[in-house]
Image: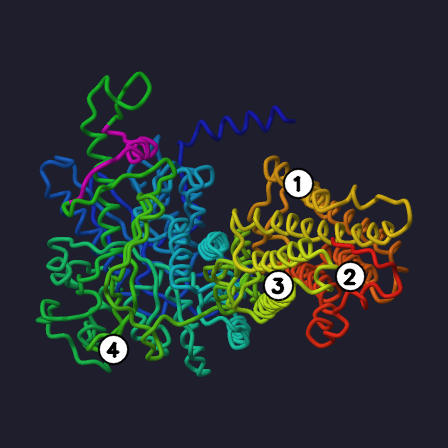
Amino acid sequence: MSLFWLLLFVLLMGKGESVCKLQGSAHPPELAQHGDLVLGGIFSFRTGQDYVVNTFQTIPELRKCKNFNFREFKFAQAMIFAINEINENPDMLSNVKLGYKIYDACGTMDIQRAALALVSGLKREISDDNCTESETVQAILGHSGSRPTIAFAPVVGSFHIPVISHFATCACLSNRKEYPTFFRTIPSDFYQSRALAKLVKHLGWTWIGAIAVDNEYGFNGITAFIQAAQEYGVCVEYSEAFSSSDPPDSLQRIIEIIKHATSKVIMAFMSHREIKLLARELYRQNITGLHMVGSDAWITDHSLTDSEGHSILVGSLGFTVSRAQIPGLEEHLRQLHPSQFPDSQFVKDFWENTFDCSLNQIANTQRKPCSGFESLQNVESQFTDVSELRFTNNVYKSVYSVGHALDNLFKCEEGKGPFSNWSCADTKNIQPWQVLQYLSTVNFTTQEGERVYFDSNGDSPARYELVNLQMTNKGTMEGVTIGIYDASLPESHQFIMNNIPVVWGNGMTEVPASVCSDSCRPGTRKVLQKGRPICCYECILCPAGEISNFTDSIHCMKCLPEYWSNKHRDACIPKEIEFLTYEEILGTLLAIFSLLGVFLTMITTLVFYCHRETPLVRANNSELSFLLLFSLTLCFLCSMTFIGRPSEWSCMLRHTAFGITFVLCISCVLGKTVVVLMAFKATLPGTHVMKWFGPTQQRLSVLVFTFIQVLICILWLTINPPFPFKNLLLYNDRIILECHLGSAVGFWAVLGYIGLLAILCFVIAFLARKLPDNFNEAKFITFSMLIFCAVWITFIPAYVSSPGKFSVAVEIFAILASSYGLLICIFLPKCFIILFRPEQNTKKHIMGKTSNNDIRY
């Protein structure tokens, strides 16, 4: 049975011919011209369709498009102009005439239909060996939109036919695996998105909204923008998408989001159709105070001026391709006449709309008939305006790219070709993949000096102009160039602003603010708010000792050890250096008490000197008394060395002078105590003690005791002497300038030696406390030593625990207290007797009931 069907199939095939049949019906192009090689074009001369839901139970019919799009018609005329230039150029494609087939289609489905018509042709059946030989175009120019281009480019690519777009910017089209034959003379949105993010950051906008068209162009563009914005520290409050073909409630939902949002800038990555709808709805609901940042798909579209609510868009910023001049294009546009395209319904509609007349009086009786003398020579319209040739220039470059590719193909020299065995293409049977090969290596310079080439992804170099939408005196919106972005330059030089003033919407003269949180001033740092984007934060004052010296700091820097933060926490200032000075109250009081002690000591010395021959003075060993008074004077004076700014010499002097003078003082007291004890022991029969402790021995004992302290001080100063030291640890906000002990052992050895002598003196005086009452020298010495020891015993914990300059004050207080104790306890009673009780200043009274032995000390 299977053999029967096989034989039947062979018989049927043998009887017929190899036939290529067109599936379905194809619509003729809007504009066409025959040629040896034909280029295809797809443009949307009309935009806007009624919302229709296709059931796909039947083949969808062509949708009727409502509004004129003169810019797209200008694109088509630029294509025709460029083809005519190439045909008239003897240096390009000589003996080869280029033709064109240009379709007018709106809506992705009808644009797809037009692309298939350019691939398949219009003939119902073709029986040639190559069914695409006479019908297939060499390349397709268009479309302006990314969404329809994404739809038909893979289909056309399967036939290896190049697609060159002048306006499709979706970064997704750079994917060579999905779109192997796609080229474009406009930069990818990847570069535009990064440029827009850098612009937003440059203007200080860190809190924005993002709205995209609901297609691949919008999604890829806004995704790339958000990614770049996050790298620059910009946060997106909301990201929404809608399409002009969506139900009305879709746009209303987005309007409600905008109403309740706090951001004042909207990144609108969409086409002119969506931005018109958005601006109209914002205008109708009286939503003001917003600023638009737009993509190149709408930012320079002249049709925006005619839309409702276009005032909302005044002040908008966006990037667009550089403008150019095309010599001869204006003349070509003004020479347009319906007679050139008798089969084009759009040209007829365009003509009737421009001159408000009817070419067919029977079909339209509401307009006057056209006279036939109508001309575009004196018409000023969007169609004839060639002052803003941006995307039109891209169409022009697209045609010339194909023209140079075909010219290189025809001029190929055998043996130098790009194909296998260095062969060239057969010019009588050019295959689409051969044109594709030459197109990928095309490289030429336009008349304006612009270099045209494609990278490995089919993309053109990225260079934009930054435009600001401003109202002109004619009441139209115009994109004024205020800056340049060139992705080929180093990143720090890619963005260049001109000195042209920027016009903002709502009558504002300064850059509007759009931030989630105000900038943190110097002296504070940013702390993120939990659950919110990084642009929403609180400003926290830097801790004491730390600063931030620039705006929006995320960290506070610690000041150097010798510096401290100022009141505002925005600068480190030198710490206040603290030491005990004469200017402060504490230093002044201590100095006064020290000088008072010197004064009292000198008065006492004067009293003793004036009464040096009296029994009381003589009985108290006048030589040791005067030496003791001298040492007390030095003790009072040495306390002055502890006040003032510590220096290397003052640090060494204060401790050594204190140690030596106090040892001299205690040595004298010790000598007097021993003399008193020995004097009364000598009154006993048979004792000769005094000859072993006479004046010579007294002087020698004082000298020996003092020399030992001097020796200790010399060793201390030699090994590790005291030195000025900045104490940075005691207080955070100030430096304590003090004298470091150097060797703690040396300091405590000096104090310990003084304490040892004081204890020895106290013990001896205590043993002599029961001498006759009329001569109570030992009691006074005992009491003075008790005060001395009490002061210095309490000094140790007070000194250790006192901070900074107060430890110095404690040491001065201890010196003064012990000095005053010695002066008052030892000399005050005697001065009182000398001055106020002279009757008691007799030898008889002094000796009392003791023997009459004359004791001279």
The mark lying in front, picked from 2 and 4, is 2
Q: Position of residue 779 (x, y in %)?
A: 83, 62
Q: Which mark is residue 707?
A: 1
**Based on the displayed image, in which of its 4 quarters is residue 633 positioned?**
bottom right
User: Relative to 34, is 486 on the left or the right?
Assistant: right
In this view, the mark in front (3 or 4): 3
Q: In the drawing, does residue 63 fall left or right of residue 717?
A: left
Q: Which residues are magenta?
A: 427-446
Tag 3 residue? 609
Colouring convention used in this rendered image of the protein: rainbow
> CB atoms at circles 3 and 4 under 8 Å apart?
no
Residue 361, quarter of the rendered image: bottom left
Image coords of residue 199 (percent x, y): 38, 59
Q: Secondary structure at mark 2?
A: helix
Q: How far, Cα to Cα, is label 1 from label 2?
A: 24 Å
Residue 429, magenta (yes or no): yes
Residue topped by disc 2 = 784
Choose between 395 and 535: the one closer to the eye: 535
The residue that appears at 72% across and 46% down in the rendered structure is: 698
Work out how far the residue at label 3 is from the one at label 1, CA to CA, in angstroms: 27 Å
Give the quadrant of the N terminus: top right
Q: Is residue 803 visible?
A: no
